Amino acid sequence: MEGKRLYVGNLTYSVNESQLRDLFTQYGEVASVKVIEQKGFGFVEMGTSEEAQAAMDGLNQTVFEGRTLRIDEARPMQPRREFDRGGYGGGAGRRY
């Protein structure tokens, strides 16, 4: 694993950042935690990539607060695509 940031999916909506921090602390230093409210996922940044790998290995597919966690290396954020704002969403090739 190259990165230190982990995606944590399948969280219950009631989980908060403090609970997630406590869960991951057993695998090393937790640099930051961000729970995306009402979406069921969040991000945890560990102190080193080795700690991130240990946390992923130790916690992926385990049950936390009644849900089976899905943990992966977080991917870099992609820029949002620009959408065509004109017409009815038809493509440029549409002819009438």
Image: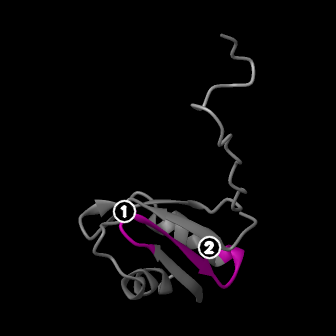
The single residue placed furthest to the left in the displayed view is 66
Judge by depth and name the residue closer to the eye, 10 or 71. 10
Q: Quadrant of residue 6?
A: bottom right
- Residue 28 visible in image: no
Q: Secondary structure at mark 1?
A: loop
Judge by depth and name the residue closer to the eye, 36 or 11. 36
Q: Is residue 25 left or right of residue 39?
A: right
Residue 35 shows which numbered tag? none
Q: Is residue 29 left or right of residue 93?
A: left
User: What's the residue at 63%, 26% (across, down)?
Assistant: 90
Amino acid type, callout 2: Ala
Q: Secondary structure at mark 2?
A: helix
The residues colored magenta run 36-50
Give coordinates of residue 72: x percent, y percent: 57, 59
Q: Is residue 71 left or right of residue 47?
A: left
Give coordinates of residue 65: x percent, y percent: 26, 71
Judge by depth and name the residue closer to the eye, 78 or 54. 78
Q: Is residue 55 left or right of residue 63?
A: right
Density class for disc 1 (Cα within 10 Å; few <14, some 14-19, many ≥20) is few
Give coordinates of residue 82: x percent, y percent: 71, 48
